[in-house]
Image: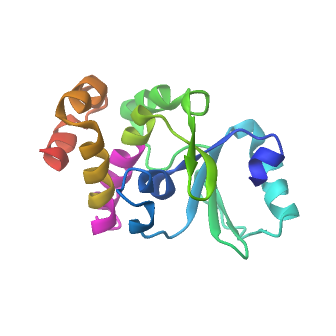
């Protein structure tokens, strides 16, 4: 609502967006709220959060800033995290270039929120799982998010939506391993 009231397009990423695929969104435990704003809106969005009582942690993160408020901890991104380096990263950025334009507003128990389209959400959570598998450790929450997402699609829709893209960026074998 803060971003909407400030006229700043944004989309909620990862956990909160993943919760919508669960039979009951409250089954998905939450840590923080990740959301994405356009690079050009990043400073304006930070000011809007500050005006609403959120404090920046002032830590220099690669692709986001962390804000702590009375209600929650937010990670405001100017690009999704976990994008690989090199040629694969260039391809991923190309696939994510229209994420804000293709995001969809959905009704939740907490009101309307904007979330990535199915394609972008799947790409982001697969990248996030890969990052955790190779770094911080893959947790049950990551596996459950992927499982409920894939279950919502079915095999045919999954293949149709992701096979060529994941092959193009070099994540098809990982996606198949996590899916089938």
**Rendering coords of residue 89 (x, y %):** 42, 35
Q: Relative to the observer, which residue lies in front, 133 or 115?
A: 115
Stretch of the chain drawn in magenta: 124-142
**Rendering coords of residue 3 (x, y %):** 75, 48
**Rendering coords of residue 75 (x, y %):** 61, 60
Magenta run includes residue 131: yes
Query: Which residue lies at the image location 42% right of the left edge and 44% below the top edge?
Result: 124
| Screen quadrant of the C terminus | top left
> Is residue 162 shown left or right of residue 46?
left
Query: Which residue lies at the image location 25% right of the left edge and 29% below the top edge?
Result: 157
Of helix, strand and loop, which mostly describes the magenta segment? Answer: helix
Q: Is residue 77 visible?
A: no
Query: Which residue lies at the image location 40% right of the left edge and 32% below the top edge?
Result: 119
Q: Relative to the observer, which residue lies in front, 101 or 168?
A: 101
Is residue 56 depicted above or below 125 in this figure? Answer: below
> Is residue 74 shown left or right of residue 88?
right
> Is residue 89 shown left or right of residue 103?
left
Residue ranking furthest to the right: 51
Q: Quadrant of residue 152?
A: top left
Magenta run includes residue 19: no
The coloring applied to the image is: rainbow
Q: Is residue 24 visible?
A: yes
**Rendering coords of residue 79 (x, y %):** 57, 43
């Amino acid at each position: 609502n803060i971003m909407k009231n400030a006229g700043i397009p944004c989309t909620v990423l990862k956990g909160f967006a993943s919760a919508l695929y669960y039979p009951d969104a409250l089954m998905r435990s939450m840590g923080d709220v990740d959301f994405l704003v356009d690079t050009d809106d990043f400073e304006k969005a930070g000011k809007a959060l500050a005006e609403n009582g959120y404090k920046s942690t002032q830590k220099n993160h690669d692709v986001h800033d962390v804000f702590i408020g009375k209600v929650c901890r937010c990670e405001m991104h100017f690009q999704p995290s976990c994008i690989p380096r090199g040629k694969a990263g260039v391809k991923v950025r190309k696939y994510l270039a229209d994420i804000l334009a293709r995001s969809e507003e959905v009704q939740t128990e907490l009101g309307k929120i904007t979330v990535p389209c199915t394609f972008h959400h799947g790409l982001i959570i697969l990248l996030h799982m890969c990052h955790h598998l190779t770094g911080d450790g893959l947790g049950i929450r990551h596996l459950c998010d992927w499982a409920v997402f894939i279950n919502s699609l079915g095999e045919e829709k999954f293949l149709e939506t992701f096979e060529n893209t994941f092959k193009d960026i070099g994540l098809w074998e990982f996606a198949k391993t996590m899916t089938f």
